[in-house]
Image (spheres, rainbow, N blue to C red):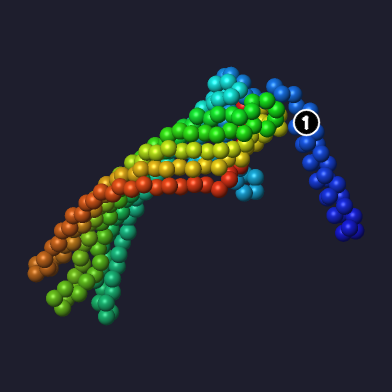
Amino acid sequence: MQRYLYSNVLLLALSAVCSFSALAQNQPADSTSLREGAWALQFGIASNFTLTSFQGTTIALKYQFNPMSAIRGGITINGSTSSGSSLTAETVADTNYGAVPGSSSSNSSSIAFVIQYLRYMAPSGPVHFYAGLGPNFGYAHSHRNSDNSALYNINSSESWVRSVSASGSNQWSVGATGSVGVEWFATRWLSLHADYFEAVQYQWGSSSSSSDYSSAISTYIPSHTNNSGTSTGWILSNSSVSFGLNIYL
């Protein structure tokens, strides 16, 4: 029974391979959508054959100038915001020091844009090799506020110390990307591609933070700090071979 099952699976796999080979061989040279004015939606293929973003972008499109050249681009926009409140209670040596309220909030946003010019090596047939080159840009922002209290032993007595802090950062990036890949057309409107991606970026950013500590005890000396800084640097990144799906419109 087990041998019979393995034989059926093997026959099914061989039939699928033969069918795809016959489909590729029987396609005429003009049976692809690599023609002037064609648009394509691009998706990445993740594990378990689920569709995901392509080259890290939420929306990716490709426009075909002619069978030999195209342009593709993508944009990613992310953002989040959160806020909350808390109530902190403390008991020391069976003495209840009550409860004090606290709060915190944060927000972040980012945008990234990449565009590439593609050059196809052979516009005829179902399999097409290509190379791409183009710029990319990015910006990210984050900010956080908090207002909390904690119980401290100050001058041999317990007292609530209030901490108010704020921090923020901004980061920009600009660079260039390059890729090489191959695209195979299953039908005129559907193709699969394998893509290797390289990127070099120059990044610069700024950050700042402040904090205030205070207490109801008159002998406690309040403190205040401010920090700020900038950073710059180069980043070289690459990806392993990624697989994707193109749907031509």
Residue 147 rendering spot, x and y as whole percentages: 25, 56
Toward the viewer: 151 or 180? 180
**Residue indicated by mark 1:** 25
Q: Is residue 1 visible?
A: yes
Q: Is residue 67 above or below residue 42?
A: above
Residue 156 rendering spot, x and y as whole percentages: 15, 78
Q: Residues within 10 Å of mark 1 (few under 14, many from 20)?
A: few
Toward the viewer: 50 or 113? 113
Q: Name the residue rendered at 46%, 38% in the picture.
A: 177
Q: Is residue 142 visible?
A: no
Q: Residue furthest front?
A: 121
Q: Residue furthest left?
A: 219
Q: Amino acid at mark 1?
A: Gln
Say left or right for 75 vs 190.
Answer: left
In the rendered image, which quarter is residue 182 located in?
A: top right
Residue 138 rendering spot, x and y as whole percentages: 38, 39
Q: Name the residue rendered at 39%, 42% in the picture.
A: 201
